[in-house]
Image: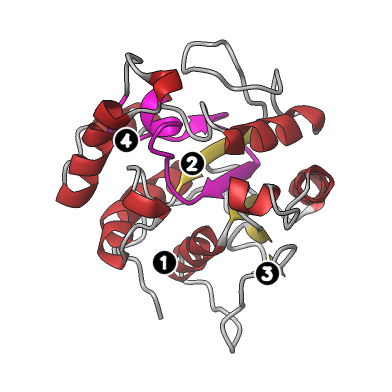
Amino acid sequence: MRDSFRKLERELVRCRRCQRLVAWRERAASEAPRSLQGAEYWSRPVPGFGDERARILVLGLAPGAHGANRTGRPFTGDASGSLVYGALHRAGSASRAVSKARDDGLVLADARITNAARCAPPGNRPTAEELANCFPYLVRELALLRETRVILCLGGIAWAAALALARAWGAELPRPKPRFAHGAELDLGASFPLVLASYHPSRQNTNTGRLTRAMFDALVRRAVARSVSGSSPPRVRTVPHHSVLDSR
């Protein structure tokens, strides 16, 4: 049967492969901070969100326990999302600067947001095995995103996942392996989207000034510019046979 975003989402939200993450995502509601006590939690794997013909794919780490794990939408309901959606709004890719809930009417144009891990992990640190379990969903999502020209990686784990995707598509990576750094750019030619890197928009980075609004806005604008001027990706992307996150 031909794959689709609807089919992918239906299968994803039923996933219970990682028992540690299943327990943690379901436990989060019972340990909600005082301001969220009584709130209804999604507590399932979080699907990607946005334009199905997006030229830009924003790739994050994982849902926050009391953010996306609660709301069911990436970068929604916590502080990280204000920077992400605010920058997309200022770049003309989001209908509003704040993402509150799955049904708030927010629309992304030419952009989509997803995560390397789809369930909230303890300490925001998924294991290698958990990332490998999620990797096939990411492969399928990129295969469906036939217009994507730029992958904007938020953090080192997202950068590693993007490199694994490139290998899965048969792209030859430079040696030594490209290292993560804010502003890093990897152009593998027309066979794979351009890969850009940003520090993750976590409070740890934004509160310390390691990542500022100006820095992130500049990188999002750069992604938009590259998505318009870059070489076109393959018109048809079939799902590669590689289904495990290769950490080499």
User: Residue tagged by mark 2?
Assistant: 114
Q: Nearer the viewer, mark 2 or mark 4?
A: 2
Residue 133: in sight, yes or no? Answer: yes
Check the image and report above or below for 2 versus 231.
above
- Residue at 54% across / 49% down in the picture? 59
Q: Which mark is residue 181?
A: 3
Of the residues under marks 3 and 4, which one precedes in the sequence?
A: 4
Q: Which residues are magenta?
A: 42-70
Distance from Cα at disc 3 to Cα at disc 4: 31 Å
Q: Is residue 103 magenta?
A: no
Q: Is residue 146 left or right of residue 198?
A: left
What is the x, y in percent for residue 129? 25, 64
User: Residue tagged by mark 4?
Assistant: 8
Q: Is residue 65 magenta?
A: yes
Q: Nearer the viewer, residue 181 or 112?
A: 181
Check the image and report above or below for 220 versus 186.
above
Q: Which mark is residue 168?
A: 1
